Image: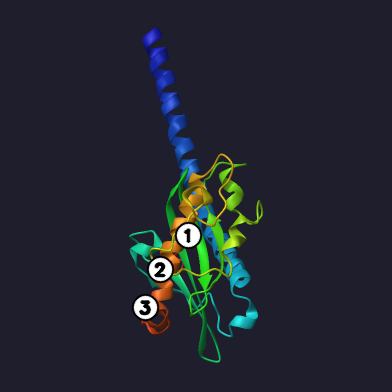
Amino acid sequence: MTFNSMQKNGLLLAAFAVVATALVIGVQILTEDEIAKQQQQQVLRTLNQLIPPTMHDNDLYQSCRLLKDPALGSSKAQPLYRAWVNDKPTALAAEIIAPDGYSGAIRLLLAIKPEGELLGVRTLRHQETPGLGDKIEVEKSNWIKSFAGKRIRGQDDTRWAVQRDGGMFDQFTGATITPRAVVSAVKRATLKLQQQADVLFNADLPQCREGQQ
């Protein structure tokens, strides 16, 4: 009798687990498109913050191409956006990844002028510690704005580090790993875009597909 009762309870628990899993999967499928749409809108808003309308007369989002290069922080191709005014190149923007954040990968968007000056950097997604590492968000701190107007003199430019490492960027109290990861990723990607700007503006790169932007 006891065995039969345990068996029934086990079957009920298994059934509940199956139903719960199905519900989770169903919700994920139903919300996938909406999440992708929200992420797309976030990127578009951020692009227009870094590259204002006066700096482009083309559709930035439709200009999206895929660039595969380790300097962008991933083995996968990342979105690259190209801006023109009257067919003259004015800015490059790229989504990049800082793979070594305190709580995992940090996705960033940066934009530069063709000659290499940074227009700015913004954080798109991260999982850093609230109250510490989340100061990379422009809504939480002005720290991320400190990249605007800066240039990189080369791979050996020691200024591109947090102050604790002898560089020019502030670190966060109790959270040095996060800004260190962001500075390193921005330096690496900016140097690549700076060196290859002429090529990238004219390169025949693959178009971004929906969901890759």
Tag 3, which secondary structure? loop
Upstream in sequence: badge 3 or badge 2? 2
| Residue 75 on image: x %, y % | 33, 60
The residue closer to the viewer here, 210 or 199, is 199
| Residue 152 on image: x %, y % | 46, 68
Residue 126 in view (yes/no): no
Q: Residue at x 38, y 17 (%)?
A: 7
What is the spatial separation of the Cα atoms under label 3 and label 2, in whole angstroms? 26 Å
Say whether residue 94 is left or right of residue 77: right
The residue closer to the viewer here, 18 or 182, is 182
Upstream in sequence: badge 1 or badge 3? 1
Upstream in sequence: badge 1 or badge 2? 2
Residue tagged 2? 154
Residue tagged 1? 160
Number of disc labels? 3
| Amino acid under disc 1 | Trp
Res. 205 mark: 3
For disc 3, the neighbor class at 10 Å (few under 14, some 14 to 19, many from 20) is some
Say whether residue 126 is left or right of residue 157: right
| Amino acid under disc 3 | Leu
| Amino acid under disc 2 | Gly
